[in-house]
Image: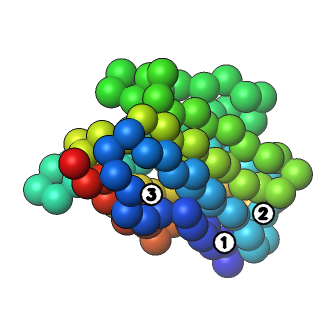
Amino acid sequence: QVQLVESGGGLVQAGGSLRLSCAASGSIFSINAMGWYRQAPGKQRELVATITRGGRTNYANSVKGRFTISRDNAKNTVFLQMNSLKPEDTAVYYCNAQISLRYGGGWYDYWGQGTQVTVSS
């Protein structure tokens, strides 16, 4: 059983900052890429940022220069530092991880339950 538990969401004024955390736990052999996605009301889920195990990052154009993704491999945790937040960043943010449960096993996508981020104008 694998769980991804997010924390750090909340309500913030435009221009403010929030830091999201996501910890993976359970019968994990290895974690490949980790990332953050978001879904606003009435919209499809979209990629925010991803990070490989080696630290290579990728960002959506809408968050470049404002958001920073990082991870702690020893703690199976990924972070998202969000600065200069805008009302259009309001969404439910989901953590994602590609996880292998055993040596030589395949990679499987796991998702967190989501954490609400609301940015007021």
Q: CA distance from mark 1 to mark 3?
A: 15 Å
* Distance Cα–Cα, label 2 vs label 1: 7 Å
Q: Quadrant of residue 120?
A: bottom left
Q: Is residue 46 above or below residue 4?
A: above
Q: Position of residue 80 (x, y in %)?
A: 57, 45
Helix, strand or loop under label 3 = strand
What amino acid is at disc 2?
Ile
How far across and down, in percent of the image, does residue 30 sit?
A: 79, 51
Using the rendered view, name the quadrant where residue 34 is placed. top right
Q: Position of residue 116 (x, y in %)?
A: 37, 65
Q: How is the image coloured?
A: rainbow
Q: Is residue 8 above or below residue 103?
A: below
| Discs 2/3, front | 3
Residue at 43% across / 65% down in the picture? 10
**Of the residues shown, which amino acid type is indicated by label 1?**
Val
Camera-nearest residue between 53 and 70: 70
Residue under the image location 62 percent in, 57 percent down: 21
Q: Which mark is residue 28?
A: 2
Question: For residue 70, what is the image quadrant?
Answer: top right
Q: Secondary structure at mark 1?
A: strand
In the image: residue 73, left or right of residue 40? right
Pick the front one: 49 or 19: 19
Query: 10 Å neighbourhood of mark 1: few (<14), some, or many (≥20)?
Result: few
- Residue at the right extreme of this rendering: 74
Say whether residue 43 is left or right of residue 56: left
- Under mark 3, the amino acid is Tyr
Label 1 near label 2: C-beta < 8 Å? yes
Numbered badge on residue 2: 1
Mark 2 nearby-residue class (10 Å; few <14, some 14–19, many ≥20): some
Check the image and report above or below for 51 versus 24. Answer: above
The residue that label 3 is drawn on is 94
